[in-house]
Amino acid sequence: MKGVSFDAMVGNPDFLTNKGQEQVPEFQELESPEGELHLRFLTASGQEFALPATGIREVISPSPDRITPIPNISPLLLGTLNVRGRVIWVADLGQFLGEALQLGTDRAEIPVIAVEDQDIMLGLAIDHIIGMDWLDIEEVQMSSGAPDSMAPFLRGEWSMQVNEDVRHLKLLDQVSILRSARWAA
């Protein structure tokens, strides 16, 4: 606006009533999302998983050289990462879940999902983030055909129709992952 001060705008009776301007309805109806917010992502093998947003501390994408390898640790762990002064362990989630394919670290950035429970934080390195979606938790079914290595860490799955195919979106339990005895191996 040319040469009009804030006080002049607010002091103008037409400013608050929108007179002379296109009238906008006072209340616009917003579509209410169904379900709970989840982060959807892929592991190195291309399997799709989801984690509840409430269990995620943050998502970061560091360059691989920021993950410091530590000798003589579990092969599931890629190393440690300093996140604002806090050191967290970073694991290859796909390897942890029993996938044969290792996460490729020869790239500019590695997506890492930091999950936390009772002051224990772990970074889960994945291949690709799909995005955030509202998913109805009531529609979660027991996982069918999940490998034994993965089953203890699943809360269930959604069956989703995509074109003519049915895809299964597996829901992970981040607390079970954090508390797993596999980290001691």
Image (cartoon, grey):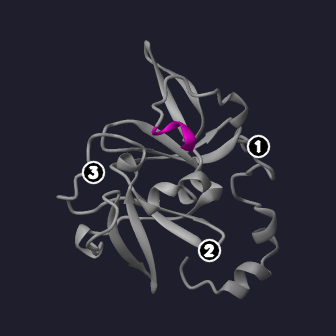
Provide the residue designation for mark 3. Answer: 103
At 80% from the left and 69% from the top, the residue drawn is 16
Q: Amino acid at mark 1?
A: Glu
The answer for how far apart the CA atoms under marks 2 and 3 are is: 26 Å
The answer for how far apart the CA atoms under marks 1 and 3 are is: 44 Å
Q: Residue 152's quadrant in the figure?
A: top right
Nearest the viewer among 40 and 74 is 74
Magenta segment includes 65: no
Q: How many residues crowd mark 1 within 10 Å: few (<14), some (14–19), many (20+)?
A: few
Query: Residue 20 placed where, x, y %?
Result: 72, 59
Image quadrant in which the N terminus is located: bottom right
Q: Secondary structure at mark 1?
A: loop
Q: Secondary structure at mark 2?
A: loop
Q: Amino acid at mark 3?
A: Leu
Judged left or right of residue 141, residue 167 is left
Image quadrant in which the C terminus is located: bottom left
Magenta residues span 149-153
At 45% from the left and 87% from the top, the residue drawn is 85
Q: Amino acid at mark 2?
A: Asp
Query: Residue 130 placed where, x, y %?
Result: 42, 44
Query: Residue 170 placed where, x, y %?
Result: 52, 35
At 66% from the left and 70% from the top, the residue drawn is 118
Q: Earlier in the sequence, mark 2 or mark 3?
A: 3
Given the current orientation, which residue lies at the most extreme left position?
106
At 68% from the left and 45% from the top, the residue drawn is 36
Nearest the viewer among 123 and 8 is 123
Q: How many residues crowd mark 2 within 10 Å: few (<14), some (14–19), many (20+)?
A: few
Q: Residue 180's quadrant in the figure?
A: bottom right
Provide the residue designation for mark 1. Answer: 29
The disc placed on residue 119 is: 2
